[in-house]
Image (cartoon, rainbow, N blue to C red):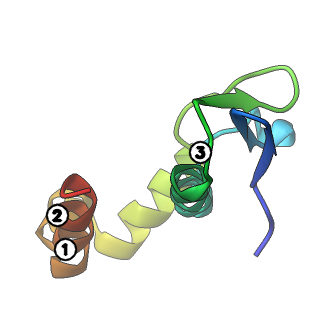
């Protein structure tokens, strides 16, 4: 898996860098997973007082990767969003992250 998110920390500052400039840092599913890991790392790093999220290249982020949305639509069909929310794994993931 490519590293689409990188992290840097100095003293009290923790930087999370969206590193997909060729796509204007459009957020893919892989990036979301890596972003979750990076936020967790920032949370576990002692002494951090500030977390800065920035984008590599000319844009912070173009938003969600439309290609990723199309993949979900192909995988789950026309009502993919409703089916995704009804999926037990997704519901469990959301519950776990809301409890944090």
Give the labeled residue for mark 1.
92
Q: Quadrant of residue 72?
A: bottom left
Percent coordinates x, y for residue 81 in the rendering: 23, 56
- Pick the residue in front: 87 or 49: 49
Quarter holding the C terminus is bottom left
Residue 50 visible to an observer of this rendering: yes
Against 48, residue 60 (above or below) is above
Residue at 58%, 31% in the rendered image: 49
Give the labeled residue for mark 3.
27
Against 55, residue 76 (above or below) is below
> For the view shown, which residue lies furthest in the front direction?
47
Percent coordinates x, y for residue 27 in the rendering: 59, 45
Give the labeled residue for mark 2.
95
Q: Earlier in the sequence, mark 3 or mark 2?
A: 3
Residue at 62%, 54% in the rendered image: 45
Percent coordinates x, y for residue 84 in the rendering: 23, 66
- Pick the residue in front: 21 or 42: 42
Q: Secondary structure at mark 3?
A: loop
Q: Quadrant of residue 22?
A: top right
Task: Tell me whether the residue at label 3 lies in contact with that at label 2, contact meaning CB atoms closer than 8 angstroms.
Answer: no
Please tell me whether mark 1 or mark 3 is closer to you in this view: 1
Q: Secondary structure at mark 2?
A: helix
Against 69, residue 59 (above or below) is above
**What distance separates the C-alpha of mark 1 from that of mark 3?**
22 Å
Residue at 16%, 64% in the rendered image: 95
Task: Tell me whether the residue at label 1 lies in contact with that at label 2, contact meaning CB atoms closer than 8 angstroms.
Answer: yes
Mark 1 surroundings within 10 Å by alpha-carbon count, few (fewer than 14), some (14 through 19), many (20 or more): few
């Amino acid at each position: 898996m490519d590293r689409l998110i990188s992290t840097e920390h100095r003293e009290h500052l923790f930087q999370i860098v969206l590193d997909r400039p060729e796509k204007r840092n459009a957020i893919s599913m892989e990036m979301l997973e890596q972003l979750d890991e990076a936020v967790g790392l920032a949370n576990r790093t002692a002494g951090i007082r500030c977390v800065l999220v920035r984008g590599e290249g000319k844009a912070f982020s173009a938003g969600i990767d439309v290609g990723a949305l199309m993949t979900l639509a192909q995988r789950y069909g026309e009502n993919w969003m409703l089916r995704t929310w009804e999926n037990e794994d997704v519901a469990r993931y959301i519950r776990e992250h809301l409890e944090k």
